Amino acid sequence: MNRIACRLHRLTPPALLLALGVVLFRPAIAAGDDSPWETDPYQLGQGLYFPQQGLRVGGYADLHYYDLDDEPRSASIDDLSLIVTKDFGSRWKLLSETDLSEAAIITRRGVSTSDATLEVERLYVDYYASSAATFRFGKFLTPVGQWNLIHADPLVWTVTRPLSTAAAFSTSANGAMMYGTRTLAQDDLDYTLYVDDTQAIGLATDADSAYGSYGRAGAINPLRNEFDRAAGGQTHYHWHDDQLTIGGSFVAYELRDPRKSYRLGGLDFDWTGSHVELSGEGVYRTPNGAQTPSEYGGYLQAVIPLPDQLFLVGRFEHFRNSTPNVTDNISTVGLNYRGVAGLVFRIERTHASHEYTGLPSGWFASVAVLF
Amino acid sequence: MFARLKYPRIVLLALTLGAGGIDYAAEPVPSEQAQMAVIASNRDSLPKIDDGSLREVYLKRIFLNSDGRPYIPVNLPPTHPLRNAFLSAVLKMNAPQMQIYWDRRYFQGVSPPYVLGSQRAVVKFVAATPGAIGYVQRCQVTPDVHVILLVSLTGVAPADMLEKCPEAATP
């Protein structure tokens, strides 16, 4: 197994940010001077693009604050993520995402970097074979639902992540994928088919935790969901110029530890109206011949635009966990401020009926930047 | 070729034009300033693209044309009135929706279209770059590019917000 995760006890966040700034902004000036096409200047949230090299460098970072019920207050830099894409000719493209997670946890006792972990979140190449099919090889995000595919902090509406989007499957896979978009009856159909063979490939495998730690030293439930082998597919249908998207996912897989086989099906949707955006995901997982009970759940989320780039967010989730065998009802109400492109400020209150599944009750806040 | 007309505002230009560009004399000219031209390089054979496919190209859901050549869509800056008109008439999204769409796609490794600073830059870039597609006011079109679609700006871009048509480019 090619584990490359390593502890970074001695690196401080300011040093990392300074290094990141040097890497990002020096070439920005050079690119602006050399471009023959009067390019638009760099903007936060779009990455830094070097057209002559077919290279784009970007990423995201976030700072979280937690005031959880019955726990001391804390803050954490959860993600410092660097995303690099590089074109090779007109048909090949490389993507890598390297993430420094849990970079620092700040409590009354001081700053701890003992949980800092450097991980390769994604590393793959895409080959554009035709207008209908692209092939992907490497480590990629598992196509179940929509949240997992856009899980970066600046892109989602809440600090907390619904259990249905991570607890029942590995959030990443190692293998090959074919995907594309077809037009049917004036609407678009996205399809994805993939196979995972982490057991054989073991490409940049990380600790794929099923639950977040939310500023605590380790999650309440240390369950991990690494695939050993998997095969699955996903489809999304976009109606009325993307106003309504409905998707379905299926994956059959064998976990590494505990070594069990499962089948998982999922449904998701996203509807954008004039005054509200509704979205939801649900999963149902059954074991193959084991005594473990089924695991299932789903959430429904509403986002209402308010004046001045403020958004009111409400979500309810029901999740039946199998290990341990408990059911959780989780409600979340929060606010987003998105007045500056690439920057998101969020605050929310979450109440979980049963905290053992890994999502605690309390106040959560964050500032996240996509650069 | 254009089996389906998804957007009523879009006027399709007959694709029987020669490789040398537009036959201006044969075109009705109701108002040069009130039309947006979607352009491709003269170095390309005339691209076979309809209005629905144009949306897919600009959303980067399809990357290659039927001949296997990559599309290179280019945009005007976010504050340009013609870009907002293109968003509304062709992509059927407003600016905040587009921002959310591209933030998500960018995270998925798909970069938004390359942004050029002016219409003149778009024409120059498209003329010199096989596979490139851009949009400009019709009066900005030069003989170095094909016009593959014409889009009416009536109702989506106030005339006083658009650039004044240069005399040299007016037929």
Image: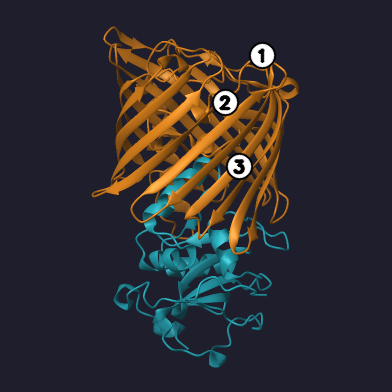
Q: Residue furthest left?
A: A307
The chain ID associated with circle 3 is A
Local packing at callout 1 (Cα closer than 10 Å; few below 14, some 14-19, many 20+) is few
- A363, above or below B89, in the image: above
Q: Residue under label 1, please give it.
A: A291
Q: Is residue A153 above or below residue B121?
A: above
Disc 2 chain ID: A
Q: In the picture, residue A60 is in which quadrant?
A: top left
What is the CA distance from the residue labelled 2 to the residue labelled 3?
27 Å
For disc 2, the neighbor class at 10 Å (few under 14, some 14 to 19, many from 20) is many
x and y, in percent, of residue A82 in the image: 49, 32
Residue bearing mark 3: A248
Q: Which mark is residue A120?
A: 2
Mark 2 vs mark 1: give the one in front.
1
Which amino acid, by three-letter code, is at mark 3? Gly
Q: CA distance from mark 1 to mark 3?
A: 27 Å
> What residue do we see at 67% from left, 75% from top?
B1
Chain letter matching colour orange: A
Q: Nearer the viewer, residue A176 or B43?
A: A176
Describe residue A364's horizontal placement relative to residue A114 as left or right.
left
Marks 2/3 same chain? yes
Residue A55 circle label: none
Secondary structure of residue under mark 1: loop
Same-subunit check for callouts 1 and 3: yes
Question: Disc 2 or 1, which lies upstream in sequence?
Answer: 2
* Coordinates of residue A191 in the picture (x, y in percent): 65, 47
